[in-house]
Image (tube, rainbow, N blue to C red):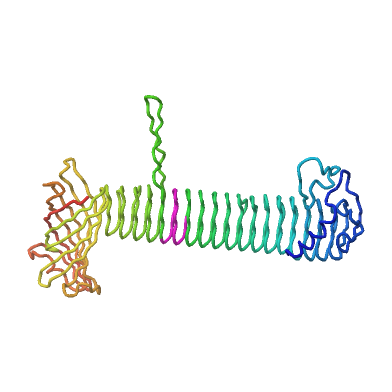
Amino acid sequence: MVAVLVAVIVPLSSVSASCGSGMLAHHPISLSLFPPISTNGSQSGDVSTNFSLNILGGYVGELRGLELGTLFNVEAYDASWLQLAGGVNVVGVGSSCGGREGCGCSSGPRQWGDFTGLQLAGLGNIVMGDARGVQLAAVNIVKGEASSVQLGVGNYGGNWATIQLGGANLSWGGAGFQLGAVDFAREEVVAAQIGGVNIAGGDVPVQLGVLNATGGNAAAQFGGINAARHNTNFTLGGVNFGGGDNEVALGGINFVRGSSKLQFGGINVLGNQDEAATVSDYGCLQYSDRAEAKSSGLQVGVLNGAGGSTGAQIGAINIADQVRAFQFGAFNFARENDIAIGPLNVILNGQFRVHVFASEAPLAGFELKTGGRYFYNVLSFGYHPTDTARVMLGYGVGGHFPCVCPKFFVDADLVGYRVNPMDDMMNMDGMSYLAKVRATAGWEIAPRFSITGGLAANVWISDKEDGASVPFLSVIPMYKMTGSTNIAVWPGASVGLEFRVI
């Protein structure tokens, strides 16, 4: 296409490109072999025409009708209706207003020519001013506003592009709709970008592609990688980045700098820290205004992290500054959280207690009690040296109730144990379970150090034995049901020592 443009521009350098001080001469029909060999001679740039037939190429001042050219069609000023070229169509190479109101080349600012209608070319369509209608070529270029449909391998709109369909679509201003392998709009996009790579400098309603990025807000992004500088409503992709607030993010990795109502993915990260306080000084008075804390709703993933406040987290690992509802996972960490559900929890305003105890079953036990201020989880290990030495591995949940006296508390919990022989402790075949409902009181006899004691109700379920030999003291009354599944119920008690880490 470059060679064709050179072939067009060089001959035109010898043709007058100015319209003088008068009106463009009107020739209804123009015939041209190659400029300046034409019916208009050397004055082609001062002629308006309705029909232009160019054997190789042609050059006129203005077109209002039909133009056909084998290699190129060139207008100094405006063109409208239909241009057909095997090579290129070029509109607006002149220096002024064309034949609008007496031309007036010497008055007013420079104004490029516009095109309205349909441009068809094998290589390219170039409009130096604005374009309205349809452009179809390998490359379509509009320097002004492309208020048109551009269809080509490459499309460019200067100040605006309404619809661009092609391999690569570029608008140095805003855009209405872009569909291509690569779509770029320096400013906002009104409708959507659909392609392999979509980039918008401003707001965009919908982006659908392998890579989506916007410098403003986005209503919806669907792609392998989605990035938004400001707020987004919905993002779906392998990796999602949000620089502001986000409504819903679904993906392998979701990162939101502000707040989010829902994050669902493998890794979810919220950087929603509280904003710093601002202090206004009014002479002898100072007024401190702390902005409202950013917050989020629900995070569901393998790893969830929130730098500020979050509603709930569900995942293997959950980390947050403040949790308003709950955390559910294998490991939960928070500065503030009342409810953490999982085997291991570190809640800085909650509890982390180590408890060793003795009971009728197991005889010797070791427990970790972790969780929020009032709700805790129990990880328990027990050893039971009866007729056959047994190992008990348990997990449970409970409630912690501080009393009016700060040194006294009551725990109520439910713990379930898997019971196996010592020499076969990893065998999970069949049923061999012990459930304990416990009420335990504690008295802090030294800072962080308490003695405990309480009562329990035990339920034994097994398809291997009836449970008579499970309690360490055989005198304990027991209710039994025997059959293919054995059930036994008996009361119990425990005493112990407890150390409070948190």
* Percent coordinates x, y for residue 106 in the rendering: 81, 42
Examine the image and state in which quarter residue 386 appears: bottom left
Does residue 442 sit above or below 210 in this rendering?
above
492 relative to 326 in the view: left or right: left
325 relative to 165 in the view: left or right: left
Answer whether residue 115 is magenta in the image: no
Examine the image and state in which quarter residue 255 appears: bottom left
* Percent coordinates x, y for residue 344 in the rendering: 27, 58
Q: Nearer the viewer, residue 328 or 135?
A: 135
* Placement of the N terminus among the 4 image quadrants: bottom right
Q: Nearer the viewer, residue 81 or 453?
A: 81
Residue at 34% of width from left, 61% of height from top?
316
Examine the image and state in which quarter residue 394 appears: bottom left
49 relative to 247 in the view: left or right: right
Residue at 16% of width from left, 41% of height from top?
405
Answer whether residue 253 is magenta in the image: yes
Question: Which segment is the magenta one?
Answer: 249-266
* Percent coordinates x, y for residue 50 in the rendering: 88, 55
276 relative to 44 in the view: left or right: left
Label count reads 0
Majority secondary structure in the magenta region:
strand
* Percent coordinates x, y for residue 30 in the rendering: 90, 58
Residue at the top extreme, as displayed = 284
